[in-house]
Amino acid sequence: MLWRAFWIPTTPLYLKIAAIGAALYLVWPMDLIPDFIPILGWLDDIVIIPLIVAWIVSRLPREDAAHSAKGPVIDGTARRI
C-alpha cells in the first residue's frame, strides 16, 4: 500500500518523505537502540516500523475524497487484524 501511495500524485509530500524514512530506518545500520543489546535491540525495529507504517496509512487520502481529487486515490483506512 505504501508503494502504491508513494506514486499517487494526491499523496501529500510529508507522507512520501515519511515512507522513505521508514524504509531507510530498516536498512540503516544505526538504530535508536543498538541491536547488540539483547531483546531491546530487536524490539525497537519490531515496534517502531509498524507504528510508522500505521501512522502513514491512517493519513492517506480516503476513497470519499476521490470525488474532489483528480486521479487515483489510495484508501487510507487503517485495517487491524
Image (cartoon, rainbow, N blue to C red):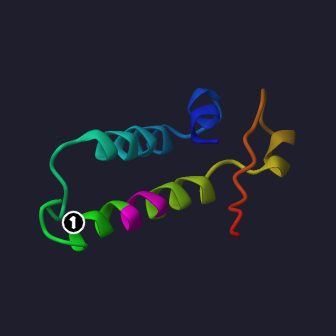
**Where does the image place residue 15, in percent across and percent down from the top left?**
49, 45
**What residue is at 72 percent from the left and 41 percent from the top?**
74
**What residue is at 51 percent from the left and 55 percent from the top?**
53
Figure quadrant of residue 52: bottom left
- Within 10 Å of disc 1 (Cα), the crowding (few <14, some 14-19, many 20+) is some
Q: Give the main secondary structure of the magenta stretch.
A: helix
Magenta span contains residue 49 = yes
Residue at which label 1 appears? 41
Is 39 or 46 nearer to us in this picture? Answer: 39
Is 81 or 18 nearer to us in this picture? Answer: 81
44 to the left or right of 30: right
56 to the left or right of 66: left
Is 64 or 28 nearer to us in this picture? Answer: 28
**Where does the image place residue 33, in percent across and percent down from the top left?**
17, 65
Figure quadrant of residue 31: bottom left
What range of the chain is rendered magenta?
A: 46-50
**What residue is at 31 percent from the left and 69 percent from the top?**
43
| Element type where label 1 sits in the image | helix
Residue 73, compared with residue 51, is above or below; it is above
Is 75 or 23 nearer to us in this picture? Answer: 23
Residue 15, compared with residue 3, is above or below; it is below
39 to the left or right of 81: left
**Where does the image place residue 12, in percent across and percent down from the top left?**
55, 40
* Quadrant occupied by the C terminus: bottom right
Q: Amino acid at mark 1?
A: Gly
